[in-house]
Image: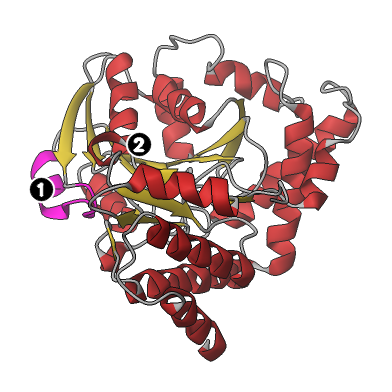
Amino acid sequence: MKGEELIMLPGPVGVSHEVLLAMATPTFNHRGPRFFRLYSDVKEKLRKILNTSAEIYFITGSGTAGNEFAVSNLVSPGEKVVVCTNGFFADRLRDAFRVYGADVVEVVSKWGKSVDLDELKKRVDGASIVAAVFNETSTGVVNQVKEISRVAHSAGALCLVDNISGIGNEYYMDPWGIDVTVVASQKGLATPPGVSFVAVSPAAKEKASKTPKRSLYFNMDLFDKSSAEFSTPATPSVNIVYAFNKALDLILEEGLERFVKRHYTNAEAFRRGISALGLELLADPKFASNTLSALVLKEKAKDVVKTMLEKYEVVVSTGLGAYKENLIRVGHMGRVDAKDIVTTLSALELSLRHNGLLKTKLGEGVAAAMEYYYGS
C-alpha cells in the first residue's frame, strides 16, 4: 500500500500540484489591489470557459450555495417556477425554489433518462423561470439544456442551469440562451471545494432587481455594490480563488476544444471498458456524460467500492437515493488522463472478482479501453 489514493469521485476531484501550490500562496488582502486584479482575471477566464459575457458572482460556499444565491435573488413567493427533475441534484434544486416560496411545477423524468421536452412544453405556460441540471451527478445524464432554454424563452421565462458537474461537456451559455449558470470549484474545474460562481445574464439581472431580497449573505444588490470595487460583500476564500485562477489557466492553455475532447475520449474509453465487462450505465447512452459514469450493479455496490479503496486505493462513490445500494459512480473529470482510466478499470475488475461479480476474464475491460485509446 503506497498510501496514494487515486481520486475518481464525481467530485471533489483530484487537484494538480500547480493548483495546490497556488493555494499555498500566503493569504493577501481581499480589499487590496492584488485581489482586485485576481477578481477581474477570474471573471474573464470563466466567461471564456462558459462562452458568455454575463456578470459573474463569487460565492464562498459549495455549488448548493451558488444555486441558492441564484434562487434567492430571482424568485418571489407564489411565482410559478418549472423545475426539470430527473435525479438527486435536480430534486435539491427544486427544494431550493420551494424554500423561497415558489409555486414549483415539476417535470419529472425517470433517473437515467433525459428531461421530457414534450412534458415541459405542456407545463411551461405562466412560468417565470425554468430550471434544470445540465449534468446530473447522481446519474451521469447530460440534459439538453439548449432545447430547455428554447422552450423557456418561448413562454417568456428565464432559464436557470446548474452546471456544477458539467464542465468537460460542451456548454455555450450565451449562444444557447441560458440566463443563469451555476458552477463550482471542486468538479470539472479541478480546484479544492469551497467556492461557487454564478453567471447572470442582463435579463436575469433585470428580474433580480425587481425581486425582494430575503438573504443578507446572498443579496445580489450588495454583490453589485462590491463589484464596482472589484470585491465581494463578505470575505471571499482568497486562497481558493487564487488556486482557481491557476486551474482556469490550465484549461485555457490546453484549449477549450481539446479540453472537451479529452473528457469525451476518457469517458468513451471508460464506457467501452465497462461494456466489455458486461456492465451498463444508468444513463441513456444518447445522453451519457463526459465527466462521470454511473454503473449499475444488481448487488454489492458498496462492497465493490470498499474493495477498490482498501485493496487498490482507487476512490469511487456509491449511488444516491433509491440507487444507493446498486450503483457505482465514477468521475472522469478535471485533470484525468488515460493512465487514470486504465488504473480505475483494473481496480474495478479485480474488485468485482474479489466480490464474486466478475462475469468475464480479467483484463477484458482494460483491453477494450486500451484498444480505444490506441485507435483514437
Check disc 1 and report the residue beneath it: 119
Tell me the number on the disc at residue 324. Answer: none
Q: Which residue is drawn at 89% across and 33% down?
A: 34
Could you classify mark 2 by the number of other residues whose Cα lies within 10 Å: few (under 14), some (14-19), or many (20 or more)?
many
Side (left or right) of 222 relative to 297: right
Q: Which residue is drawn at 72% across and 43% down?
A: 244
| Color style of the picture | secondary structure
Q: Give the range drawn in magenta.
A: 111-123
Residue 32 appears in the figure: yes
Horizontally, residue 32 falls left or right of residue 343, namely right
Residue 196, quarter of the rendered image: top right
Residue under circle 2?
89
Q: In which quarter of the image is residue 285?
A: bottom left
Quick check: marks 2 and 1 in contact, CB under 8 Å? no
Q: Does the magenta stretch include residue 121?
A: yes
Task: Work out whether residue 320 or residue 18 is closer to the camera in this orientation and state it.
Answer: 320
Residue type indicated by callout 1: Glu
Front tag of 2 and 1: 2
Answer left or right for 230 relative to 46.
right
| Image coords of residue 235 (percent x, y) | 73, 17
Q: Residue at x 82, y 23 (%)?
A: 30
- Does the magenta-highlighted stretch encompass residue 304? no
Q: Residue 358's spot in the image, x, y percent?
A: 34, 65
